[in-house]
Amino acid sequence: MFVGVYLRFFYFLGGVALKNIYAVGLGSALGGIVRYLLDLFFLSYGSLQPEFSLLLINILGSYLLGFGLFYYSIKLKNTSQFLMHFWGMGFCGGFTTFASFVYILSEAILSNDIYSAIIYASLSVFGGLSGFLIGILSAKAI
């Protein structure tokens, strides 16, 4: 019975949707691995605190998202759903991490360090948006 439901579900998705699922899965796996390695590098050789490592990774991920989406869709005129899902939701989604962001904020809030939480949240949001916009501008310049 379970196999029948499983097969009907994937039949319902269709071939294009299934390819997009693979794109997101592959991209997020690669993005997560790259994030992990970059985090190790920042913590080991950059002597950064975990909060700053995460902040830099999330800003870099926002930059890569803006650059990649603009470059592929506008510059190369490539609107492949596979590529957009691989890069946007997949790689950049796996590379950046909202759960760690919330965890760091909750630690600050639970330790009554509200000002640090506000500053960190503000830097993360505005840094991410700035990184995204700078990524678009960088792709336009190419």
Image: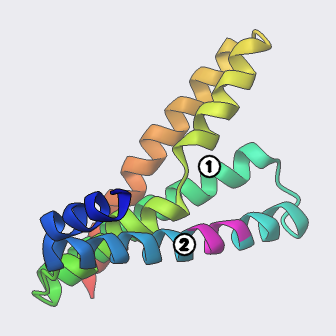
Kindly indicate the quadrant of the structure image that contains residue 134.
bottom left
Q: Which region shows up in magenta?
A: 32-36
Closer to viewer: mark 1 or mark 2? 2
Q: Nearer the viewer, residue 113 or 28?
A: 28
Q: Nearer the viewer, residue 27 or 41?
A: 27
**Label 1: how many residues lie within 10 Å, few (<14), some (14-19) or many (20+)?**
many
The answer to whether one can see residue 67 in this image is no
Q: Quadrant of the C terminus?
A: bottom left
Please, what is the three-letter code of the amino acid marked with disc 2?
A: Ala
Task: Give the mark nearest the N terminus, 1 or 2.
Answer: 2
Q: Which residue is mark 1?
A: 55
Magenta stretch: residue 120 in it?
Answer: no
The residue under the point 47% across, 47% down is: 127
* Mark 2 secondary-structure assignment: helix
Could you say where residue 20 lies in the image, as x and y percent from the top left? Answer: 26, 73
Q: Nearer the viewer, residue 98 or 114?
A: 98
- Per the picture, the main secondary structure of the magenta-coloured stretch is helix
Total numbered circles: 2
Magenta stretch: residue 35 in it?
Answer: yes
In the image, is residue 75 above or below residue 138? below
